[in-house]
């Protein structure tokens, strides 16, 4: 397993990490790993979502002949 060391970690950030670890009943190292993993997974999810949106935006769908709103409203009023 790899080893990661951090230098010059601001005291304020360390204290936040320490408090979060205590609240979650984890060691500081475990909490750092959880935060790092969540951040990396979030980035991957955002990339997949952006790709899906680009793909959907590229679709050319013409619903004008398939969905006639005027006729649907007329049918609903006649009920």
Image (cartoon, helix red, strand yellow):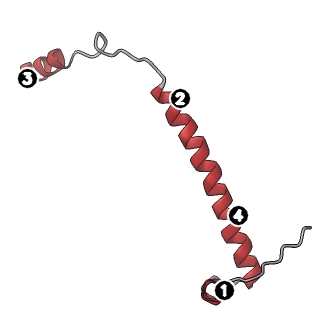
Q: CA distance from mark 3 to mark 2?
A: 38 Å
Q: Is residue 68 left or right of residue 62?
A: left
In terms of image quadrants, where is residue 29?
A: bottom right
* Foreground: disc 1 or disc 2: 1
The percent coordinates of residue 13 (x first, y second) are 62, 83
Provide the secondary structure element on which disc 1 rests: helix
- Which residue is labeled 2 in the image? 55
> Residues under labels 4 and 2: Cα distance?
27 Å
| Residue bearing mark 3 | 77
- Residue 74: percent from left, percent from top: 10, 18
| Secondary structure under the numbered disc 4 in the rendered image | helix
Cα–Cα gap, marks 3 and 1: 65 Å
Q: Nearer the viewer, mark 3 or mark 2?
A: 2
Residue 2: name its quadrant: bottom right
Dot 4 crowding, Cα within 10 Å, few <14, some 14–19, many 20+:
few
Q: Quadrant of the C terminus?
A: top left
Q: Are marks 4 and 1 in contact (CB under 8 Å)?
A: no
Depth check, mark 4 against mark 3: the one in front is 4
Instruction: Name the N-terminal-most of marks 3 and 2.
Output: 2
Task: Give me the disc on residue 14.
Answer: 1
Q: How many numbered circles are shown?
A: 4
Q: Looking at the image, is mark 4 or mark 2 earlier in the sequence?
A: 4
């Amino acid at each position: 397993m790899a080893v990661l060391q951090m230098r010059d970690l601001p005291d304020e950030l360390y204290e936040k990490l320490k408090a979060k670890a205590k609240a979650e009943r984890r060691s500081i190292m475990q909490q750092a790993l959880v935060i790092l993993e969540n951040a990396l997974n979030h980035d991957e999810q955002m990339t997949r979502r952006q790709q899906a949106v680009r793909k959907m935006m590229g679709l050319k769908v013409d619903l004008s002949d398939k969905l006639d709103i005027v006729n649907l409203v007329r049918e609903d009023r006649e009920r």
